[in-house]
Image (cartoon, rainbow, N blue to C red):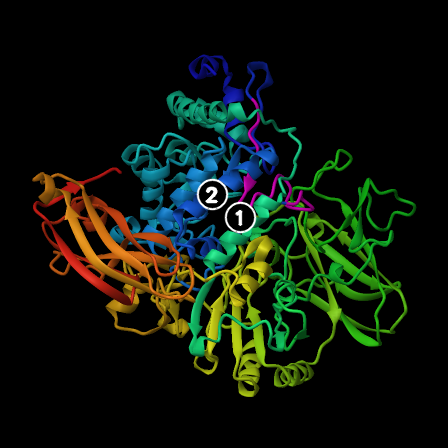
Amino acid sequence: MDIEDILSKLTLDEKIDLLSGVDFWHTKAILRLGIPSLRMSDGPNGVRGSRLFNGVPAACTPCGTGLAATWDEELIQEIGQLMGKEAIAKGASLLLGPTVNIQRSPLGGRGFESFSEDPVLAGKMAAAAVRGIQSTGVVSVIKHFVGNDQEEQRQSADSIIPPRALREVYLLPYQIAEKEAKPRGYMTAYNKVNGTHVSENSGILQNVLRDEWGFDGVVISDWYGTYSVAESINAGLDIEMPGPSRWRAGLAKLSVNSRKVTHHTLNQRVRNILKTIDHVAPLKLSENSTEGTVNTPEIAQKLLRVASSGIVLLKNERNILPLDNGKTTAIIGPNAKFAAYSGGGSATLRPYYVVTPFEGVKAHIDSLEYALGATAYKKLPMLTSITNAPNGSPGMEMRIYAEPHSVKDRTPVERFNIDNSSCFLSDYKHPDISSNLFYVEVEGTITPETDAEYLFSLTVNGTARLYVDGEEVVDNETTQRPGDSFFGSGTAEEVGRKHLAGGRKYTVLVQFGTAPTSKIAKGGATQMGVGGLQIGGCIKTDPASLLEEAVAVAKRVDQVILSVGLNSEWESEGWDRAHMDLPPGSDALVEAIAAVNPNVVVVSQSGTPVTMPWADKVPAIVQAWYGGNETGNAIADVLFGSANPSGKLPLSWPIRLEDNPAFINTKPDGGKVLYGEGIYVGYKWYERTKRDTLFAFGHGLSYTQFKLENLVIADSQERDNQSDSSDVEILVDVTNTGLRDGSEVVQVYVAHQTATVQRPPKELKAFAKVHLPKGEMKSVKITLDKKYACSFWDESANAWVMEQGTYHVLVGNSSQNISLQRQFEVAQTKWWTGL
């Protein structure tokens, strides 16, 4: 593509057309000049394709924290490559990920999407993912740049971040990714940073990203995350998403004609888009590319490997793990027969398949008992899990109508079966539907095994009613209560109940009108025009009876696997967690089972920390995150020793929510979120304040043992007598002294106690994962970039400074388990900017 020639031939209207999407996932094509459309797709743990609703199945990787818990850059690069190939199969040339925000609080709704509380670990993981994705020719659009670290009021909240913290904590992972992997795309965050929305913040988009770091790619808004015309164009935002444009169509031309936007600036925005189009041209994709799958045994094995590699063995008293498959075993808990494979929101996709912990464990052991013990749903489970469609297949039938329910003998424009009754219809398309207003019927049948009271529910962005055999059971139309559903645009859940007789078939019918029929007024800028509905349903349970049954099962077996945790209802885009606790009933379940069986292994799934008041009462705890397609198999392989756990915590695990450094500054206060902890995020806070954690940053046990020894520092300054040399080589011998093959993570921290400003007691600066057969030793070499290892942000100079002095290198296998120490010198103070 001759970009300058095409730029000269584009009309003003055509240039403006290129500056925004035409629908939810595509940019505008200019056919007369051979400019194709770009297709984008989420996301952070898999490639959904171009449909949020009823999309093509995809590979689902572990969540961001689960990936970072591997501490394995090579493996994450492989996963990035897998995602790039999946994007091509889905016809997408731009992949919206990875997510690189910092987990400053356990309550952040999208914390599970991000990698770590530490900017170096987050940056290294991001760089590895970007390298893998872009090795396939697909553009990685790294996000959310920057300061989108909570969900509440995310589009209006002003993240007040001190300059030093902004540089050393929140921008640093992006800087590392830019230095090491050169992502060709950035997505701007919804929020403001220090008074200005990022999508129109020239200090961040132009001064830092383009001028200082030399970024030469495309900058895209988060969906509905644009709030101006001239300001965003001038600041460096190339593409407003999604389409149709709410800002640039019509108004951008006025901004150019009134000289609020110069032709030079407009051309630069278009040039960046054309360069991106030219870069992905070899993929030969178009807006009409069909969406396919790449579901192969090889991909399944890779997903299993990464999921098991990120599982963290937090505690293992009496070496209760790995379990003996010859002993009588029970698996108990709300997550046992539920595959918590992903968090909610933009991370959601339709997986090729999912494996529950029960299914994974069952493959390792012939005789397995089960009890639910407690429920963990926030809203009622999907009704599709217990229904059949009219044609007899599992799920329900959905029928789309242009006319309202009052019209007799209307004909559906489309009918199809769904296997998930959480239906976000924002990107639904049909040629006979010309607006956001249309009507839906969802129908299925239930045949209960025994007499029981059933609960039914509706949660909508729109209006809906639910009928069982013609009797209205749920009304979410007459009176509607605002809730946090559908990215904050929907209602609270409305629940009804009906007694059903065993052996009898019942027909459930839901009538739904899309978002324009809604009777609630929702604030905020994210208004997903078509809306959606979620249909729930299950047998009404009695908590006391569930607990009693679980205790009885636990008493009669040798060992118990307790499968607890959160799921996509508790951790999701659109809202933050209200607390750090497990769902109601889970803690009581653990306490009760631990009281009757001494051989209890708690397997907890979550994307960020949960309170564990029972931690000292159980002998073994496994943190399994959201594990993607292979969730259950990965958990079972670790429990029974087919895989030796090697994961390390990518974030500190506080004892209480109140111990967290951002506790009093998590929520917006008067529209502002004060980052009052400054640079002291995560382990840096806990060590600085001498406050205990339940489990330290970097902690993770193994079924074997490792010894670190013979630390040698090879300072190139001393070696070459060059004061401007920028690397330090660290050599350490790692020996597997145990009886199993395994992997250890060598963690390198740096401390400088004589700095002219306050600095954390130590900071992670490098790491390496080493795989060792039993009894073997390997000498591991890690190179430190001295600038990055030693510098802090000098606010007075508006630059990084590497101060003269002695720096201590601390090597261990967690932030609190340092076994080796040496030091090196910086001979001369230097200031620097850029990469």
Residue 725 against residue 756 in the figure, above or below? above
Q: Is residue 97 magenta?
A: no
> Which residues are the magenta region?
36-57
Position of 731 with respect to 701 (left or right) is: left
Say what secondary structure mark 2 lies in.
helix
Residue 78 tag number: 2
The answer to which of 735 and 457 lies nearer the viewer is 735
- Are the residues tagged 2 and 1 within 8 Å (C-beta)? yes
Outermost residue toward the front in this view: 775
x and y percentages locating residue 127 in the rendered image: 38, 43
Position of 510 with respect to 342 (left or right) is: right
Give the quarter of the figure containing the C terminus: top left
In the picture of the structure, the residue carrying the numbered disc 1 is 302
x and y percentages locating residue 234 in the rendered image: 38, 31
Magenta segment, prevailing SS (helix, strand or loop): loop
Say what secondary structure mark 1 lies in.
helix
Query: What amino acid is labelled 2 in the image?
Result: Glu
Task: Write the residue at 62% across / 29% down.
Answer: 287
Query: What amino acid is labelled 1 in the image?
Result: Lys
Task: Write the residue at 29% across / 73% down.
Answer: 691
Residue 476 against residue 212 in the figure, above or below? below
Task: Write the residue at 53% across / 78% down.
Answer: 600
Residue 726 against residue 742 in the figure, above or below? above
x and y percentages locating residue 778 in the rendered image: 30, 53
For the residue carrying disc 1, how many other residues have a C-alpha within 10 Å: few (<14), some (14-19), or many (20+)? some
